[in-house]
Structure formats: structure tokens, C-alpha cells
Image (cartoon, rainbow, N blue to C red):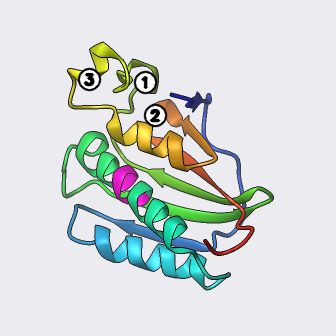
Amino acid sequence: MDVTVMEGPPPKRGEPHYRAEFAGEAAKEQVISEAIASLAADGPLGGRESFRLRLCLDEALQNAISHGNRRDPQKLVRLLIFRVSEGWEIRIADEGRGFDPGRVPDPRTAEGQEKESGRGLLILTQYMAGVRYYDGGRTLSLTLAARRRAE
């Protein structure tokens, strides 16, 4: 899986196009809907693009809640979306201990097929133009390529 691990924090980007901060799963669906609506306000999303974006946001936010914050209601998940030259950068940060994405088994291998983890990361690498981790695995940066036309 094509994932880049970067040392230190992600680069500064200025003011985000969209931001949300929440704890637990209760607000996740609302945050996903708001984030997609904020991107759609910049130009219509095609059906395939909207589906892929919703799926990736759901996977990434759920990973931050479940694996990063270990469902601790005192810990927050932060979602920031920035306009960048390639399109959009979607950042998801949790308050967990971090992790090494290189240790996540690839679900396309015989070893990975036996595991319950790794499928979400595979989805992100398949549908996003870039997947990077910062801060010891506590911050995920997804690149959503600029739209050429609605699908």
C-alpha cells in the first residue's frame, strides 16, 4: 500500500476551508455530511466522487476514533480541509499514541487476508491521490485530486 510516513507535524496551510472537532462516533456522520457539503459548494461532486469521499472520510474518522483515541470520550478528533494546488488536503488528527502504518498488514497478501485490519488503509490508498501520516501516525493527510468534471 502506497503510504508515506513523514517526520514531525504536517506543514502549515493557513486557514482551513472546513474544520470540525468532535469526540466519539455520535457526531461522525454529521461531520462527514458537512465536510462533503463544504467541498460540493466549491463545485458539484459526481456520484462516484461523492461515494469515494464519504467512504474515505468514514474509514479515516472511524480509525481515529477507534484505534487512535480508543473510543475515549475525553479525546477529540480534528478534521481540517485545505485548498491546495493538487486539489484538497484532508487532515484527520487524533489524540492517541500513534502507530506505524508500515506494520499494518496488506489485506491483498495471504498474511493480510487472515487479519481484520488494513482494509481501511487500502481503501484510502486506492481512492485518494495521496496518503501521508505525520506526528508518529496521529495525523493523517489525504489528498483529494482536483476535480476535472462531475462523474
Disc 2, SS: helix
Amino acid type at circle 3 is: Gln
Say if 53 sits above or below 60 in the image. Answer: below
Q: CA distance from mark 1 to mark 2?
A: 6 Å
Disc 1, SS: loop
Residue located at (47% from left, 45% from top): 124
Q: CA distance from mark 3 to mark 2?
A: 23 Å
Q: CA distance from mark 3 to mark 1?
A: 19 Å
Residue located at (35% from left, 51% from top): 59
Q: Which mark is residue 113?
A: 3
- Residue stretch in magenta: 57-61
Amino acid type at circle 2 is: Gly
Residue 64: say if magenta: no
Image location of residue 11, percent across then percent down: 70, 46
Q: Which mark is residue 137?
A: 2
Disc 3, SS: helix
Q: Is residue 31 left or right of residue 14?
A: left
Given the current orientation, which residue lies at the most extreme right position?
85
- Mark 3 or 1, nearer chain start: 1
Residue located at (33% from left, 77% from top): 30
Q: Is residue 20 left or right of residue 40?
A: left
- Mark 3 or 2, nearer chain start: 3
Q: Are marks 1 and 2 in contact (CB under 8 Å)?
A: yes
Say if 30 sits above or below 72 in the image. Answer: below
Badge 1 is on which residue? 100
Residue 40 visible, this angle:
yes
Residue 140 visible, this angle:
no
Q: Are marks 3 and 2 in contact (CB under 8 Å)?
A: no
Image location of residue 70, percent across then percent down: 21, 43
Image location of residue 5, percent across then percent down: 57, 28
